[in-house]
């Protein structure tokens, strides 16, 4: 495998520009592909590095400056991602104050196809009261969705397989650490193969402390047009479905169907436990899909619930310029405040030198037959049991009102 190291802080190494392709690597006999790294200039994106991968059909841009998130992509001309009001992104973390707006400052940089939430916590902002040594009380505010998305990678490399199928891998290391707190390194590998309709994100989370540490991670995959439109459908094999709050209860009946852009729409969130394939090569894995109105375009996420046991559906069908988007979000936890999740056992504890691996695969489906086959696969998983749909927020998934 050919390896190109583009960033390595341990060696004081950083490469501003990089490009390679099949021809440059002497692999001209197969499908075309290319990998390019560049630095953006101007506005709030100034200083952001992008690694752009094109496998000949599927292309996507990785942002090492923003926690190895994936900014935008396309497949056979169809856009992957969404139109965020953050129109000048990807935003350099230097311009994101996570503590602003009562802990909602994270939203100032939110415009990715994939953004990770964590690692010490994720979910809604919350406060923790503490008593200091002198007897006085203090409050600590924890921001929306944690810090990992706003930490630059300390190591970045591109790997290309010299033998078929010539796998393309972008590897990045991102460390979230502070004195007197957790220290976890995420070793991320984003991979695809030339001509494929898939990309896989494999993350390994490593405890760097001399004591156990807690962690959470949520994979916030976000989609807009053309996969999201009026009468698009969410398709998955739930064991249970629970509305997060009274607002979600309002749309519970038919929650799997999307409406048109609606200015002023208030988000609706549904917590799921998904069933898995009982046997065969996909045993232990599950999938969740977003299908367009015509049933001839879809995106599907495949993953293992033993790695990511919680799934959240985020519906935010506001105006087209307000952020018309839906999130498909496998995670170690539901995006409730950390104290709520910890009390219910939805926090991963990494022992000394311990590791947790999480892998998600995005598959882009083109054509009515491919979409129908994927829906039939979901139906086979669901045939094991009928889903339980809770009519209101319920323990242990959400706070009962």
Image (cartoon, grey):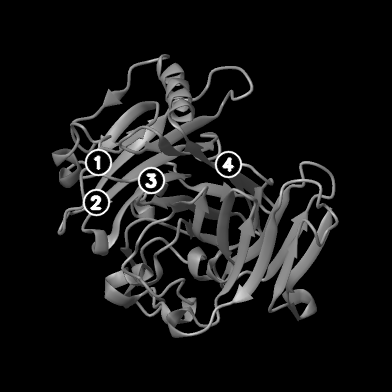
**Residue 243 picture location, percent across and down:** 24, 39
Give the CA distance from mark 3 to mark 2: 21 Å
Give the CA distance from mark 4 to mark 1: 25 Å
- The front one of 25 and 175 is 25
Relative to 392, 50 lies left or right: right
Looking at the image, which residue is at 43% across and 35% down?
288
Give the CA distance from mark 1 to mark 2: 8 Å
Earlier in the chain: of badge 3 and badge 2, it is 2
Per the image, label 1 sits on a secondary structure element best described as: loop
Q: Name the residue under label 1.
A: 258
Q: Is residue 217 visible?
A: yes
Per the image, label 4 sits on a secondary structure element best described as: loop
Relative to 262, 282 lies left or right: right
Q: Name the residue under label 2.
A: 317
Which image quarter: residue 38?
bottom right
From the viewer's perspective, is the residue at label 1 or at label 3 nearer?
A: 1
Relative to 9, 348 lies left or right: left
Q: Mark 3 points at which residue?
A: 334
User: Marks 2 and 1: in contact by CB < 8 Å?
Assistant: yes
Instruction: Relative to 236, say whether 214 is above or below.
Output: below
Looking at the image, which residue sits at the far front?
29
**Residue 114 picture location, percent across and down:** 48, 55
User: Marks 4 and 2: in contact by CB < 8 Å?
Assistant: no
Give the CA distance from mark 3 to mark 4: 29 Å
- The front one of 61 and 12 is 61
Q: Name the residue under label 4.
A: 197
Instruction: Relative to 276, say whether 116 is above or below.
Output: below
Q: Residues within 10 Å of mark 3 (few under 14, many from 20)?
A: many
From the viewer's perspective, is the residue at label 4 or at label 1 nearer?
A: 4
Disc assigned to residue 129: none
């Amino acid at each position: 495998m050919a390896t190109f190291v583009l960033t390595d802080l341990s060696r004081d190494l950083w490469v501003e520009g990089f490009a390679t392709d099949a021809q440059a690597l002497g692999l001209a006999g197969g499908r075309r592909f290319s990998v390019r790294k560049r630095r953006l200039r101007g506005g709030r994106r100034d200083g952001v590095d992008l690694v752009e991968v094109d496998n000949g059909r599927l292309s996507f841009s990785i942002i090492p400056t923003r926690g190895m998130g994936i900014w935008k992509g396309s497949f056979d001309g169809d856009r992957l991602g969404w139109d965020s009001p953050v129109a000048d992104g990807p935003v350099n973390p230097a311009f994101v104050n996570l503590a602003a707006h009562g802990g909602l400052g994270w939203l100032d940089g939110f415009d990715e196809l994939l953004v990770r939430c964590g690692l010490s916590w994720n979910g809604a902002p919350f406060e923790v009261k503490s008593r200091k040594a002198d007897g006085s009380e203090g409050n600590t505010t924890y921001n929306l969705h944690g810090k990992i998305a706003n930490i630059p990678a300390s190591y970045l490399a591109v790997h290309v397989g010299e033998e078929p199928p010539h796998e393309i891998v972008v590897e990045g290391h991102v460390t979230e650490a502070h004195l007197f707190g957790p220290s976890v390194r995420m070793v991320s590998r984003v991979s695809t193969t030339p001509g494929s309709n898939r990309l896989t994100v494999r993350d390994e989370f490593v405890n760097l402390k001399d004591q156990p540490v807690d962690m959470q991670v949520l994979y916030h995959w976000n989609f807009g047009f053309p996969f999201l439109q009026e009468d698009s459908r969410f398709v998955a094999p739930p064991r249970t479905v629970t509305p997060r709050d009274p607002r979600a209860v309002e749309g519970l009946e038919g929650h799997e169907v999307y409406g048109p852009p609606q200015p002023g729409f208030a988000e609706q969130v549904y917590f799921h436990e998904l069933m898995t394939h009982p046997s065969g090569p996909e045993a232990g894995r599950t999938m969740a899909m977003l299908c367009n109105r015509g049933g001839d375009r879809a995106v599907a996420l495949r993953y293992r619930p033993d790695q990511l046991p919680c799934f959240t559906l985020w519906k935010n069908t506001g105006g087209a310029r307000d952020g018309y988007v839906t999130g498909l979000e496998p995670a170690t936890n539901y995006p409730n405040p950390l104290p709520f999740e910890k009390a219910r056992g939805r926090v991963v504890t990494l022992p000394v030198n311990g590791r947790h691996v999480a892998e998600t695969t995005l598959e882009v489906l083109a054509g009515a037959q491919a979409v129908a086959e994927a829906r039939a696969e979901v139906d086979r998983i669901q045939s094991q049991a009928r889903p339980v749909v809770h009519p209101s927020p319920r323990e242990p998934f959400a706070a009962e009102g």
